Image: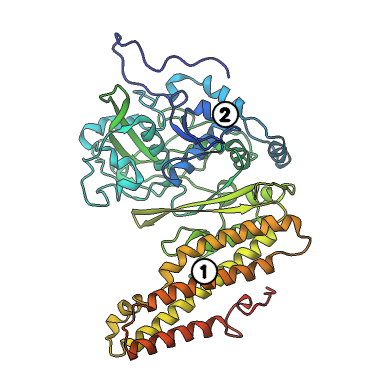
Amino acid sequence: MGRALPPTHPPAAVEQRLSWDPRREPCIPSVTPEGARVALSLCELLDRADYLTTIDCPTPGETVAVIEFVMAICFASGACPNTPEEWREWIRDERSLRSAAEWLVAEPDQHWDLFHPDTPLGQNSLLASSFEESGTGTAQLVIERAGDYNQFFDHHHLEDGEPLPAADAFRAMLAQHVYGTYGRARITGRILGPTVTNLSTGRLQGRIRVVPLGRTFGETLRLNLYPPEGEPGRLNTSWTSGSVNRRNFAVRARPRVPESPADLHSALGRSVLLRPKRDADGGIVVDRVLIGAGEVLELDPGKHMQDAVFSRTTGGELKPLWPSPTRALWQEAHALYSAVKDAQPGLYARLRSLPRKRDSQGAPYHLWAVGLVSNKTLPVSWTDGYFPYAPAMEAQLYRASRRGSRIAEYLAWSLKRAAILASEKVHSAARPADEARHMSRFDARWMFWPEAAKPFDQLLEAVIDEGYDNPGDPVAALLLEYTQTLTDVARTHLVYRLDTLPPNERGFQARAAALKRFEDDISHPTKAPAEFRGETAHD
């Protein structure tokens, strides 16, 4: 793997500033084929990529951020395919990424020191002049705890917060660069300029990032690497190093076009500065942080957002598929399969070009969709979904996912109508302002939706399992089974909710009316999807 790195810590007798290097320090939670979780350095991660099953950070967004950064390392090292044909060869031949690990070992140490005084990895040392005045506790660094960067979700002040191990702080910083929400930072603009307080939306914030997953982490990286247009480029290792002419904070930022794939996937979406100290056990932790405005990128959807699946809003605007607080990602799986089926340029055209692959363990690949649900400046939750993909089966998967989503939505609509009728029967004199509250008592949708996800996943897996062996079309029969399963789930939850009706004549009548409406809806000759009548849909 090239030359060896120097020891992690200097001799105890020598006074020296603290340093921490993710190339050699265990920092990435990884999973072995045996299911064991191990923490690996970046060099180990790349060297053992084809042995590891995956990486598994505490949140989906953090995992995506690490994948983005490792992709940037691969591009900067030249470990990337040059043409779509070569990309397919890399996948077929399981091309090793060990050359990226060797390149990483040979990089200058000062570029990879998380706490270097002039070029701290992933950070902006210019913030040092404001650190004593504006630095806060570590909660500001962690998206799930930072809230709107001014308070916690539970309104505790950002001054509170336990020190973070250096490895955790490193990964949290990567997540901030790509997923940070817009808003006002706590840093004062008195020293660096007024616009240092204006945080822009992160590159992946507000949209769904789709990551193809393979059987190993190495295969995952190869699936996501792509032929660059021009040079693969150089990493952004810090704000004050490299060839990029970065913004200042005296005036509003002008978006810049990424110079290369390495530049894009390591872009510094935030100015960050971390302060280290030794904990009681001698380990290095971060106890104070400062976050300010970072780079603003001008992205070309076709070139810089190859994984994005575009959809129209209710107002007709075309935008990348976005995370929703009310609609689970599996309900949008058909959009991903449609992009492959139609050979959308970029990632999905490459996925469609892969040869048909038989795998005894099920789907050879998965499409992992990840998004951050936020309420304006306030992060709410991560949302993600895993969808199986097998080359040459995109049309069947598209049809199954589209029909499956429609069937689930129709059942949810029927449950709502049954709940409304039950509420009207038992609360006939309710005031309009109370109708929604009364109806929610009988509304089974909130129990139905979480349980509908598993049958949907099983439907897609079954399409792949049976599609390889079935010379015909397995989708129609599988959709009938899926519809029956989902109908039973919906009916069970409706009955459970109706059990809360009063045990009197009005309650019995309400129960009977609600159940009849549900059964009438799912057997309607024109409104209900054909599968409810045991028929095959032809759309």
Residue ID for mark 2: 48
| Label disc, if present, on residue 286 of the rendered structure | none
Q: Is residue 261 left or right of residue 361?
A: left
Q: CA distance from mark 1 to mark 2?
A: 46 Å
Q: Residues within 10 Å of mark 1 (few under 14, many from 20)?
A: few
The residue under the point 64% across, 30% down is 96
* 1 and 2 marks in contact (CB < 8 Å): no
- Taking the view exactly as shown, the residue that stands out farthest to the front is 503
- Taking the view exactly as shown, the residue that stands out farthest to the top is 13
Query: Looking at the picture, which amino acid does disc 2 mark?
Result: Arg
Quadrant of residue 447 in the image?
A: bottom left
Q: Is residue 396 above or below residue 80?
A: below
- The percent coordinates of residue 380 (x first, y second) are 36, 55
The residue under the point 48% across, 37% down is 266
| Label disc, if present, on residue 316 of the rendered structure | 1
Query: Looking at the picture, which amino acid does disc 1 mark?
Result: Gly
Mark in front: 1 vs 2: 2
- The percent coordinates of residue 248 (x first, y second) are 36, 37
Q: Residues within 10 Å of mark 2 (few under 14, many from 20)?
A: some
- The percent coordinates of residue 27 (x first, y second) are 43, 31
Quadrant of residue 216 in the image?
A: top right
Judged from the image, the secondary structure of the residue bearing numbered disc 2 is loop
The residue under the point 67% across, 32% down is 95
Q: Is residue 390 left or right of residue 103?
A: right
Quadrant of residue 502 in the image?
A: bottom left
Q: Is residue 260 visible?
A: no
- The percent coordinates of residue 416 (x first, y second) are 43, 78
Q: Is residue 197 visible?
A: yes
